[in-house]
Amino acid sequence: MGDDPLYAASRDVMGSEFRIDRLAPEDPPWDLLLDADPNRTMIMDYWPRGRAYGLWHGPDLIAEAVFLPTRPLTWELINVAVRDAWRRRGLARALIARGLEDAHRAGIRVVEVGTADATLGALQLYLTMGFRIVGVDMDFFVRLYRDPVVDNGRLCRDMIRLALDLSVPGLAGVEED
Ligand SMILES: CC(C)(COP(=O)(O)OP(=O)(O)OC[C@H]1O[C@@H](n2cnc3c(N)ncnc32)[C@H](O)[C@@H]1OP(=O)(O)O)[C@@H](O)C(=O)NCCC(=O)NCCS
């Protein structure tokens, strides 16, 4: 995967003033986590089981991504957020690319992600990284969230499920078995 132009470009875009590292389990960055997922109870459930990455600009944490091992050989990108002022600079892409590299190194075959039907920026991000739509969980947000979830002024209703197959040659730079 290290040779794949998409992931190499993601690293280059950051510059040396940025740093990606694992986040300590005892220190969840609540403001960022809640920006991506308004359900604190659900975050408290997956945070201790997740593999979390932070992206720092100098001493400031400006983005996070959490991957969760779900099934054998499968991780889910369960939470990702970038501070408002730092968006559209390729930072989420770089952070996710780092997680995908580690997933590949760990022998993971599939990385999954879900996003709301109203969260079009995130959907575009995942699609441009090679994730493909594998299903739609109808009325997910209506069933699981007590209060209406609104993004970009639109009510979130369905969950779009996507997956990236890390074993597809050329897509993620992974050798065939
Ligand atoms: C979604 C989010 C993580 C994207 O972070 P980011 O650092 O701005 O994303 P990037 O700069 O890496 O974007 C890479 C590509 O994704 C797409 N993209 C990202 N945000 C987009 C937006 N708001 N609208 C359209 N396309 C978008 C673009 O194709 C972009 O490439 P480009 O800027 O060259 O056009 C950020 O907007 C965020 O934190 N949102 C709030 C939390 C959230 O919704 N998390 C996702 C929950 S599923």
Image (cartoon, rainbow, N blue to C red):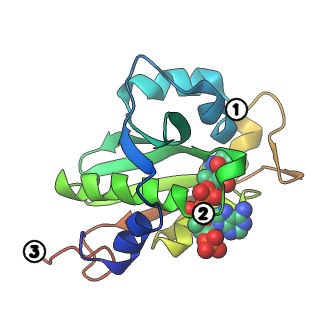
Q: Is residue 150 left or right of residue 30?
A: right
Is label 2's Cβ within 8 Å of ligand 1?
yes
Q: Which residue is mark 2?
A: 89
In the current view of this chain or complex, which residue is farthest to the top? 26
Which residue does the image show at 50% across and 24% down from the upper left? 28
Q: Is residue 177 positioned above or below 42 on the image? A: below
Q: Amino acid at mark 3?
A: Asp
Q: Which residue is mark 3?
A: 177
In the picture, the disc for residue 87 is none
Q: Is residue 140 positioned above or below 134 on the image? A: above
In what quadrant of the picture does the N terminus appear?
bottom left
Q: Amino acid at mark 1?
A: Pro
Q: Secondary structure at mark 3?
A: loop
Quarter of the figure with residue 51: top left
Q: Amino acid at mark 2?
A: Arg
Q: Is residue 98 positioned above or below 19 on the image? A: below
In what quadrant of the picture does the C terminus appear?
bottom left
Instruction: Specify few, some or many for label 3: CA neighbours under 10 Å numbering under 14, 14-19, or 20 or more.
Output: few
Q: Secondary structure at mark 2?
A: loop
In the picture, the disc for residue 38 is 1
Which residue does the image show at 46% across and 19% down from the upper left? 27
Mark 2 or mark 1: which comes first in sequence?
A: 1
Q: Is residue 3 positioned above or below 24 on the image? A: below
Instruction: Specify few, some or many for label 2: CA neighbours under 10 Å numbering under 14, 14-19, or 20 or more.
Output: few
Mark 3 or mark 1: which comes first in sequence?
A: 1
